[in-house]
Amino acid sequence: MLTLHTRLTEAAAVDGELVLPFELREKSRLRARLASGEEVAVLTVRGTVLRDGDLMRGSDGRVIKIVAAPEATYRVSCADPQALLRCAFHLGNRHTQAQVGAGFLRIRADGVLRDMLLGLGATVFDESAAFEPEAGAYGGGHHHGDGNLLAPIPLRQKIHRPSDPK
């Protein structure tokens, strides 16, 4: 079985595609199938999120492109930026992952959140789309680079609180 373990920033050629919804692109250990049907294992650092267009090198040297699969989402828009910001605040208050676009938000389809957004005056459209939510503010992020092996090295970030001694 092909094992994908190294993220690349570029490649001369792409040998296949791995189409995944966001839910699977944020897993650090995964079995999946390429678009061709071949089974693969994906091994990344815990907390790594694979984004649409990312390139991964396999154990045999092949390069596989990650493709964000269309999934059930809501496209949220409002009459003015302040109303959209209010919707974003309430989604964040519920720890809801959201994609921020030019004049819209995109979230996973959820009837309870839809009702809340409609109650806030938003327009909510059902949409089958690739879901690429914002990365968390405290996430360690990930590093690109040719040959950067995605090994299980924990990334820790100290969160400074006002009550911490100086």
Image (cartoon, grey):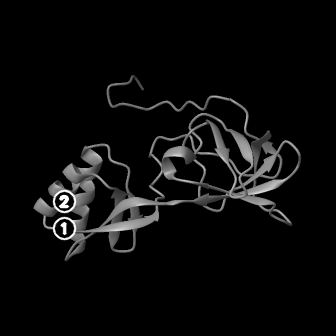
Name the residue carrying label 1.
122
Where 88 falls versus 139 (above or below)?
below
Q: Where is residue 46 in the image (x, y as percent from the top left)?
A: 60, 34
How many numbered callouts? 2
60 displayed left or right of 28 = right
Name which quarter of the figure residue 79 lies in. Answer: bottom left
Where 111 falls versus 123 (above or below)?
above
* Residue found at the very far bottom of the displayed protein: 79
Q: What residue type is labelled 2?
A: Leu
- What residue is rendered at 25% in x and 63% in y? 85
Name the residue carrying label 2.
117
Q: Crowdedness of circle 1 by 10 Å Cα count: few (<14), some, many (20+)?
A: many
The residue lying toward the viewer, choosing from 165 and 100, is 100
Answer whether labels 1 and 2 touch (C-beta < 8 Å). yes
* Residue found at the very far front of the displayed protein: 37
Which quarter of the figure is the N terminus placed in?
A: top right
